[in-house]
Amino acid sequence: MLQLIVAGLTVGSTYALVALGIHIVLRATRVINFAQGEFVILGGLLAFTVVNQLHQNVWVGLLAATVGGFLIGLIYERIVLRPAARISELTVTIATIGTVSVLLYGHAMLWGSLPEPLPAFLPGDSYHLGGVSIQRQSIAILVLLALALAALYAFFERTTFGKAIRAAANDPLGARLVGIDVDRARAISVAISIALAAFAGTIIGPLTLVGGAAGTAITIKGFVGAIVGGLESPVACALGGLLVGVAQKLIEGQFSYGVADPAVYTLLLVMLLLRPRGLLGARAVTRD
Amino acid sequence: MPILAVAFVAFGLAFGGNATLMEAGTYSLIFSIATIGLSVLLGRVAQISVGQAGFFAIGAYAVGYLTALATWPPGVPAWVQYVLATLAGVACATILGLVVGFISLRFRGHYLAITTLTFNLIVIGIIHESKPLGGVDGISNVPYPQFGSLQISGTVTYWYVLAIVVALAALTWRMLASRTGRAFEAIRNDELAAEVAGVPTRRYKILAFAYSGALAGLAGTIYVSYLGLIVPDAVSVALSIDLLLMVVLGGTGSLAGAIIGAAAIGITNVYGHSLGNLRPVLYGVAVIAIVIVLPNGLVGLMPRFGRRTTAAKPGPVSLRPAIPAAAACDTPWLAVSGVTKRFGGLVAVDDVTFTLQNGTLTSLIGPNGAGKTTLFNAICGIGRIDAGTVRIRGVDVARYQTHRIVALGVARSFQNARLFGDMTVLENVVTGAYASRHFTFDDATATLRILGIEQLASTFAKDLAFGDRRRVELARALAGNPQLLLLDEPAAGLNASERDRLRDDLVAIRAAGITILLIEHDMRLVMEISDRVMVLNFGRLIADGRPANVQSDEAVVAAYLGVAS
């Protein structure tokens, strides 16, 4: 049981980062990025290239994937999201769905369709705690997740630029009037979100392999996390993502591997219908 | 459309011997059945679905299972099995379409995309796990449909599907040209205004989902018996995305576009195998490029033929028809009692009670933010009220959806004249009378004549000058033959002569016995024509009486001028 929970937290950290990425893009551009999960895969593959083909340290791979994700995010915002946003919300939605197709098969073209392994961040034996063995890798993932969350918090809450981005997201017109470059703020938001996705794809890589066609499933599970926690709050998104990971592993452990995914998706529909603001979001609503 | 049908017939005759081309043509036609449904949903009702492969899967698996695996009672001929299996598949897809449509009422835009995508994933997940359906391996050896000595396979399938597509295109075209099509168009343009015009918007959105689901399911049933095989991977989200791509590529909302898009992708699917993964990458790039650069798709490149509009014969102004007289009625048309509406901590409408005397014109005035429009919304059933009752001709409408309130004989206009921009003036007016089934274009022309704007009949609403927009909105409100007319600042932004015309119209409407409740800031107009004036301030009624009395009321003067007490 505890074993499953730890495993769940580990995969859940990807969902948490995806949920957070979806949250950031949604806040900044009012759009849900359907390609978020594909960018997770892309990040893992970038790291794979740097580590296994350019023979660099895995930490260099993580850095390269994150920076690469940031740059790709800038390009993505500039050539896909921004032009589409000028037409309609539906157009952006369709454009991000088109991006899924580009990335999904683009990955397969460049890297082949079979998943590839990444070396561990913390090599060595598992820890044993009262009959539960915890892989060092799981610890590394959770620590890295915590670091990413702390960095995001510091950026959005403690720096002027981070606050400007939040202002631009909350009230674009008002932000423009006080001299904030809203387009730039949006571009940076998207870039941060994609960098997070790439980061997530890399840290989970040693456990789950990188590449393959799991992108859409990751997007949806990240979205389930965001909805379960509450789309409006970054902390709720992260917690929701972890929760979905744990739920998935518990269902896999109790029933069978194949049941978990449909069950998690059904959870999404139920949440959307009953508590669209999330388990944690509901409190914020009654407060005002 | 007829050109397209001829093209497909010519294609079939010319390349009947070329197996690869016939295969491409057949797949194109099979997919176009699904894209016709999706195009209606996406283009005409502006509801996105990224889950059409789920419906497709249900149709395909129903026929696959029932014709290849299920045990039928002895003596049931193969063709009966096929027909029943097809009906079962389409029925299941339709029912699921209703369910998804119902769920989707809660969502818009990207939430809808997520919901439908999730539906697709759930269907695939269940199929994967279900042993009777073959799990990952799917169902193979699905027999070809056999009608006597005629086997629907190979080239025969091409003609069989072509016949179905032509029939469905004709059916869909008729639907879109009818009252249903106007309802769709109105919903796409402005959902709230459509509901207020009496269109049951929820029902139509569910209908559109069910229709698109049924067609996707039908496409699945034909697909499985043509290929003889169905596996879960064939009906994954990738197919949903492909179908969406076909619609967007051809031209969203256009029937010809749906078929052209399916043909374009169907042909590249067969011929693009050598491209491997590059093919779907290019598809994705094409989708992004098309939605941004060419929002009307491939059909947008072709010259548009003049749209069918019913031209109105302008009649001399002196021959203006009379406004239909209101039915005599003893029960008050509108009685509001203790109505309260809160937004969070703000009480927008606070315990408001009044009854209108039938056939009179009452003005509702008050400073901006006093709650006037919120009160209108409460009367129309837009958003639930927190306390109190609204009675329309004695009927408590607490649990009524807006279109049902409208059907009782209520019409309203909006502060910002919410017309259906992509529809002509005449179509706008016809839609305004949605609730009365027998309202014709001639009746709409008559309504335009009453207001002296019949010359605008074939103008698109989005091209109207501001003053005309207001008049057309009034015409749309009158078209439904309302007994109670709620007008939200109809004079705002009008010039002096337009304003005088409005005054005369309002007097004429009242003379016909129609009860009017008017929100207006133009005090001269209000004082000239009102039988009674009510003043709302901070959500409360602070004065109510004859215009002259209200004008001299101290509380009213204070509310408007902010006099220190």
Image (cartoon, coloured by chain):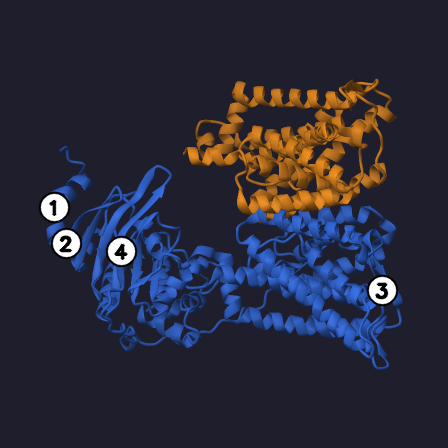
Chain colours: A orange, B blue
In the drawing, what numbered circle is on residue B553? 1
The crowd level at tag 3 (other Cα within 10 Å; few <14, some 14-19, many 20+) is some
Which residue is the site of mark 3? B228
In the drawing, what numbered circle is on residue B336? 4
Which tag, 3 or 2, sits closer to the chain's start? 3
Image quadrant in which you'd find residue B431: bottom left
Q: Are marks 4 and 3 in contact (CB under 8 Å)?
A: no
Using the image, name the chain to which the residue with label 3 belongs: B
> Considering only vertical position in the picture, is B458 above or below A124?
below
Q: Is residue B371 left or right of residue B527?
A: right
Of circles 4 and 2, the one toward us is 4
Report helix, strand or loop for mark 2: strand
Q: Say which amino acid is labelled 2.
A: Gly
- The x, y position of residue B244, in whole percent, is 68, 54
Q: Say which amino acid is labelled 4.
A: Val
Q: Are marks 4 and 2 in contact (CB under 8 Å)?
A: no
Using the numbered discs, state the Cα–Cα distance from disc 4 to disc 2 in whole angstroms.
Answer: 16 Å
Q: Are marks 1 and 4 in contact (CB under 8 Å)?
A: no
Q: Are marks 1 and 4 on the same chain?
A: yes
Using the numbered discs, state the Cα–Cα distance from disc 3 to disc 2 in whole angstroms.
Answer: 78 Å
Using the numbered discs, state the Cα–Cα distance from disc 1 to disc 4 in whole angstroms.
Answer: 23 Å
**How many numbered dots are placed on residues in this image?**
4
Which tag, 1 or 4, sits closer to the chain's start? 4
Q: Say which amino acid is labelled 1.
A: Asp
Which tag, 1 or 3, sits closer to the chain's start? 3
The crowd level at tag 1 (other Cα within 10 Å; few <14, some 14-19, many 20+) is some
In the drawing, what numbered circle is on residue B545? 2
